[in-house]
Image (tube, rainbow, N blue to C red):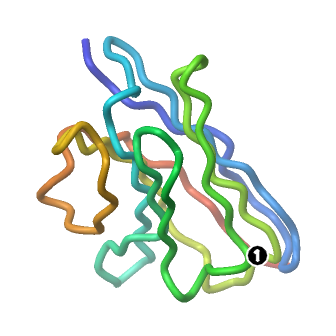
């Protein structure tokens, strides 16, 4: 079964940090760009960050630039999203997704281009 599984979410105070993980099972991530998306209550899902298959290129939404860092360890078949200086507006369900178009050499936030999606992981930033 091909799937992505997110972990690492939870409740954190404003200013705190969390690291999300996205692990693949049933397939290798080596030729996939990986995107992180999030959906807050009452809002549409939005792109947060993306990393190409080689890790050479990354992309961030303006709202998280300078606070979030995406990375990958292809040997572990896992992608990470380090989230620092968290704000209440970062509260959302976070999803990782894999895009195999072009062997993952391009980062995009177009959801229809992503082949596999995780189940989502709740992140709540609150005091």
Residue drawn 26% across and 19% down? 2
Across and down, in percent, residue 30 comes to 40, 26
Looking at the figure, which quarter contains the N terminus? Answer: top left
Return the residue found at the far front: 56
Across and down, in percent, residue 92 comes to 52, 69
Image vertical order of residue 27 relative to residue 32, above or below: above
Pick the front one: 10 or 75: 75
- Residue highlighted by disc 1: 86
Residue drawn 43% across and 24% down? 24
| Residue 43 in the figure: left or right of residue 22 | left
| Residue 37 in the figure: left or right of residue 62 | left
Residue drawn 66% across and 50% down? 9
Q: Quadrant of residue 25?
A: top left
Image vertical order of residue 23 relative to residue 69, above or below: above
Across and down, in percent, residue 96 comes to 42, 48
Image vertical order of residue 106 relative to residue 34, above or below: below
Q: Secondary structure at mark 1?
A: loop
Image vertical order of residue 46 relative to residue 113, above or below: below
Residue drawn 24% across and 37% down? 103
| Residue 60 in the figure: left or right of residue 37 | right
Pick the front one: 111 or 33: 33
Pick the front one: 56 or 112: 56
Q: Quadrant of residue 45?
A: bottom left
Looking at the figure, which quarter contains the C terminus? Answer: bottom right
| Residue 100 in the figure: left or right of residue 125 | left
């Amino acid at each position: 079964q091909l799937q992505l599984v997110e972990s690492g979410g939870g409740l954190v105070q404003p200013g705190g940090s969390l690291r999300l993980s996205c692990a693949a099972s049933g397939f290798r991530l080596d030729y996939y760009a990986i995107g992180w998306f999030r959906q807050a209550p009452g809002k549409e899902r939005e792109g947060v960050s993306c990393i190409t298959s080689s890790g050479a290129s990354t992309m961030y939404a303006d709202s998280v630039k300078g606070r979030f860092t995406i990375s990958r360890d292809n040997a572990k078949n896992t992608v990470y999203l380090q989230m620092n200086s968290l704000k209440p507006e970062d509260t959302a369900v976070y999803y990782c997704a894999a895009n195999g178009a072009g062997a993952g050499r391009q980062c995009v936030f177009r959801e229809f281009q992503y082949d596999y999606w995780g189940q989502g992981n709740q992140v709540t930033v609150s005091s």
